[in-house]
Amino acid sequence: MNIFLDKMKALLGDEFDDFLKFYNSSGEHYRGLRVNTLKCSVEKLEKLLNFDLKSAPFCSESFYIPNEITSLGNNPLHHAGAFYIQEPSASSAVTMLDVQEGDYVLDLCAAPGGKSTQIAAKLNSKGFLWSNEIVKNRANILLSNIERMGIRNATVSNAYPEVLCDRLAGCFDKVLVDAPCSGEGMFRKDSTAESEWSDEHVKSCAERQLKILNSAKNALKDGGVMVYSTCTFSVEENEGVIGRFLEENPDFKLEDANVNFGRPTLEYARRIFPMDGGEGHFAARLKKSGELYKNSFTENSKKKIDSKIFDFYDSLFIGRPFGENIEVIGDKIIVLPQEYVSYEKLPVLRSGIILGQIVKNRIEPHHSAFMAAKADECVSKVDFDVNSAEIKAFLHGEEVAVDNNIKGYTAVCVNGITVGFGKCSNGRLKNKYPKGLRLL
């Protein structure tokens, strides 16, 4: 690692010793979570957790958590999508993207989903999010997190960036490129990232990053905004890539993101070191020339939908909260986002939410729909406290005792936040929580 440390010394100068103090503090890296405002308010989560949250400077919904807190992923509120476990400085890039309700946003390198789910919370179910991940198994993890966080207006794909961005040319108001990198900002919490580091790897990352960025620009509208980010300190992968991109693309310019976290570089880009309160991030906001126009690409389904499907929909949810743009794909009933970009001939894992699955002559509800629903949108629901034996039993896959008056498919909530569903009869709730998500 001598080459890495020599580069850091050249980059940091008098602050190198301060960096080393953080770098040598094994096991003391920054840990955090981001509140998912689609399902829970900051104030509510603070009351429900049994530890204190400390605000992070990178995002108003991002917080530091104490290092002694363990097994947070097993918390029922995590299962319910009330929060996303995320190193605080990782939220900086989406803050710089400045997503507004109604925007069409592409997250090009999205797995495991921290930044995509942050974008979706800012959209607040208005506009549209396309989340892409080139590696198939990582794309499945991305989809799982999109579902857990209750996101209705997203498409998740597993496509090559150049193919996707050519096919979706000029469709997006904003694009995020959180590029694969050498991961120098991961060293304190991931020994694998450190062991895989080499100067050659840094150089190959820089070449790949520039290629991805040059693909991403095609998906952006004139006048649109693109944020490039990495979790590395490398000048070659950060300032170097941005400098080369701007040389090759005179229709783009660096833009002030009006943030004060981290420290400025290239005048308007931001770099975050451990001394600045995060493990390590770089982000630059790029503006494309031209005048931005707002438009909708919605294409309503032209297929006639059996009235039984709407009857089924109405039996579960009040007021058809996901909209009525329904398609039957194979044995699945999909409610497409109310605004979306067509995905014909692209490798899409899912667009919108799965309302149900056709099994022989009946329709079974799907976990996806209940995760996307608010408690007051569900026809039938039971609500358990986060510390109750009932919610723990449910997440283990067990049957749970309920009131005898509750019948049929019923949403299961934890302190008013949907976490799944079951089927009630004779005072028992038969568990429908997916086996792959259950607590062991």
Image (cartoon, helix red, strand yellow):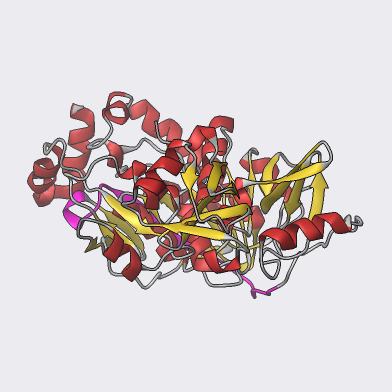
Q: Is residue 165 magenta?
A: no
Is residue 89 shown left or right of residue 108? left
- Place of residue 48 in the rendered image (x, y in percent of width and height, measured from the top left): 30, 61
Name the residue rendered at 56%, 32% in the picture. Answer: 135
Whether residue 406 is visible: yes
| Nearer to us in this view, 299 or 147 | 147
Is residue 123 shown left or right of residue 387? right
Name the residue rendered at 59%, 54% in the picture. Answer: 410
- Place of residue 37 in the rendered image (x, y in percent of width and height, measured from the top left): 44, 65
Name the residue rendered at 63%, 38% in the picture. Answer: 158
| Nearer to us in this view, 288 or 193 | 193
Which segment is the magenta one? Answer: 274-294
Residue 73: which quarter of the image? top left
**Quarter occupied by the N terminus:** top left
Name of the residue lying farthest toward the top: 195
Name the residue rendered at 21%, 45% in the picture. Answer: 69
